[in-house]
Image (cartoon, rainbow, N blue to C red):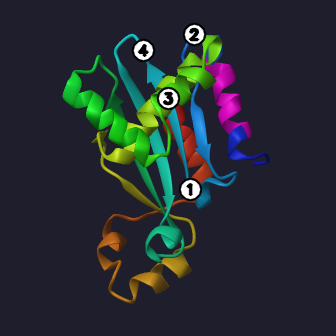
Amino acid sequence: MTGTMWDKVQEANELRAKLGETPWLYLGDASIREGGLAVTVDRTFGFATIVEATDLDSATGCAGAVLLQRGTVILDRLNLRQRRNLRSAMQTVDQTMAALRAEYQGDEKWKRMALLAYAKWIYGERDEDSPRVLVHDREAFDEACETGRFEGWQQDAEDCDSVRETFMEELYS
């Protein structure tokens, strides 16, 4: 496969547009093995779906694998306590509501909602499916697990020929 993750997500968005679905906003590296996250918002039902890949070597020192997580974030009307939490979440990603409102208006309002969902996800206000450890370099992964620090991951880790394809499958499911 050629092209960056941004290109691949754009291809998915072109198909989603034909189906009348909201686009994915991709935040991350050009190579998903280095980490990235995609967000799509369902404004009708007030939630966002997020798919995130975390390079386990950078995050933990466990080479040869990526942690793939999928989940949802609720985006309903906020009471005072929820507004305070949202403000804290926005600070976590160095953003403010005012800046988002000013930058994303009109046709780009969906990006504002996606970035709000991203902030809540990073802040920990999420409902996650079971995470998956995708091994793209078995030799490096097994060597990292020999230290004993990552031994528990070996049981559930799945070999993955293409992290990008697996990530994209999550966007299409």
The local secondary structure at tag 2 comes to loop
Residue 44 vs 151, above or below: the answer is above
Tell which residue pokes out farthest to the right in this image.
Answer: 2
Rounded to the nearest angstrom, the CA distance separating label 3 from label 4 is 10 Å
Residue 4 vs 145, above or below: the answer is above
Camera-side residue: 89 or 37? 89
The local secondary structure at tag 1 comes to loop
Q: Within 10 angstroms of label 3, few (less than 14), some, or many (20 or more) residues?
A: many
Q: Amino acid at mark 2?
A: Gly
Mark sitting on residue 35: 1
Q: Nearer the viewer, mark 2 or mark 4?
A: 4
The local secondary structure at tag 4 comes to loop
The local secondary structure at tag 3 comes to helix
Among the two numbered marks 1 and 4 on one chain, the one whose residue lies closer to the N terminus: 1
Q: Within 10 angstroms of label 2, few (less than 14), some, or many (20 or more) residues?
A: few
Camera-side residue: 63 or 173? 63
Residue visible at 30% across and 49% down? 130
Mark sitting on residue 43: 4
- Look at the image and give the residue range highlighted in magenta: 7-16
Relative side of 131 to 16, left or right: left
Residue visible at 40% across and 48% down? 69
Main structural element of the magenta stretch: helix, strand or loop? helix
